[in-house]
Image (tube, coloured by chain):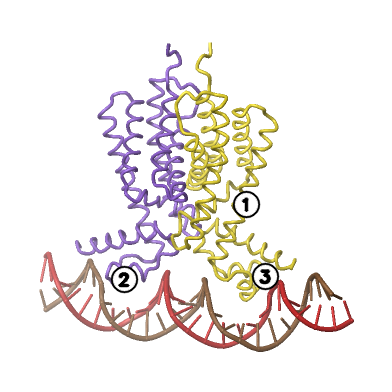
Chain colours: A purple, B yellow, C brown, D red
Amino acid sequence: MRKGEETRTRILDVAEAAVLAKGFGATSIDELIAETGITKSGFFYHFRDKNELAKALLERYIENDERIYDEIFGRAHDLADDPLQAFLLGLKLLSELLSDLPNGHPGCLVATMCTQERAFDREIQEINRQAALMWRRRFGAMFRDIMRHYRPREALDADQLADMVSTVLEGGIVLSKALKEPKSLPDQLLVFRTFVRLLFQPIAQA
Amino acid sequence: MRKGEETRTRILDVAEAAVLAKGFGATSIDELIAETGITKSGFFYHFRDKNELAKALLERYIENDERIYDEIFGRAHDLADDPLQAFLLGLKLLSELLSDLPNGHPGCLVATMCTQERAFDREIQEINRQAALMWRRRFGAMFRDIMRHYRPREALDADQLADMVSTVLEGGIVLSKALKEPKSLPDQLLVFRTFVRLLFQPIAQA
DNA sequence: CCGCTCCTGTACCGCCGGTACGGTTTTCGG
DNA sequence: CCGAAAACCGTACCGGCGGTACAGGAGCGG
């Protein structure tokens, strides 16, 4: 009914924070049910096992991720007609959004799942792969659009450029966590932005 | 004495592979002692607890990592006098090295530790931070050297550029694992290499 | 009132990290 | 070659955790 969904969401909220902070293995079910105020039986009513919790967590995370990208780059395309300017603006907006997170980026579940555990089943690995492929399609389309209007100074594959967005995001998250410098992630994104601007700058300037 | 070190090394070898594949939490001590052929008592003779295993694992990994960078970029500097050419060559050599790994990069322990667990103590987090700072110093020095000879087309901070190397490596590892495409990591490194070449290209070409 | 969703309570299992501790073999310096 | 330290083995035990089984109950819509 309604109540069930609400409880399930509350479990997922608590679980997501715990998993991003401590890792999946270090997050105990006992701990989750204590914080959500339900019993162990209640937990297993919603999730068959921990693996299904991981799956639900990941799917919800990816959905939310896609929504954020839709919104930011959608807004960027509303503000700028030119595909290059829109993309650069999108990166800027994303960087600002990441800067405004008080404790830095909480971490990426996709990275957590694929870095940390081959303990998960193939289904989760496939969800992860699809998420990365969606990022590639999303940004790849943008780069292809840009390349229809601008000639890059160096021949680079649109898909590899698209992957670079994901790479910088995932790598920036890792680095800013390791360094304990939340600003590193948005900074790295801006460095990448400069590279993209440089790549599509017209050769004849003077 | 001598035998002790050998056994300890064997434990670390087995543990490193397991941790990179399944994550730290999912790697059981029972599993490690079974594969190394020792008993539980033997394990705890070498490591007080799992956290000390993690620490030893991380320190050894970082040492080895530094050695590899020393060798590759040392060789690159032997082959090219110019600091920019040497750096670009180093990236190329590194990319080729990563391409030659049959099953792709096994994963970065620094990323594993900092992504996955706030369950580790502060000591490990500090080791992680120092590793990232060492990368920054290493590549930052190279970029500063380059900037003494070349004027970048865009004003970028040498340390942020240095961090970009780590970002691309860590992000590339995550992405190639998520995509199950080992080639992504070396490819991303080459894309970054193109960006660096572009950044320091003289403006007046004709 | 029935039946379904959404739980609670209790009891239990096996794995795992970790402790304790006594005993044994191996190794190396003197 | 001897003795002592190093490098283990064996066994027993503990508590936490993931997971199972199952009985029961509260609330609510039809």
User: Which one is closest to the eye, mark 1 or mark 3?
Assistant: 1
Residue at mark 3: B37
Answer with the quarter of the image where residue A38 lies.
bottom left
> On screen, B19 above or below A65?
below
For the residues labelled 1 and 3, the Cα–Cα distance comes to 26 Å
Q: Circles 2 and 1: CB distance less than 8 Å?
A: no
Residue type indicated by callout 2: Ala
User: Does residue A17 appear left or right of residue A116 in this picture?
Assistant: left
Which quarter of the figure is the N terminus of chain B placed in?
Answer: bottom right
Residue type indicated by callout 3: Gly
Residue at mark 2: A34
Residue at mark 1: B63
Q: Residue at x 48, y 21 (%)?
A: A153
> On screen, A158 above or below A204?
below
Secondary structure at badge 2 equals helix
Q: Residue at x 67, y 41 (%)?
A: B71
User: Which one is closest to the eye, mark 2 or mark 1?
Assistant: 1
Secondary structure at badge 3 equals loop
Image location (x, y in percent) of residue C16: 52, 71
User: Dot 2 falls on which chain?
Assistant: A
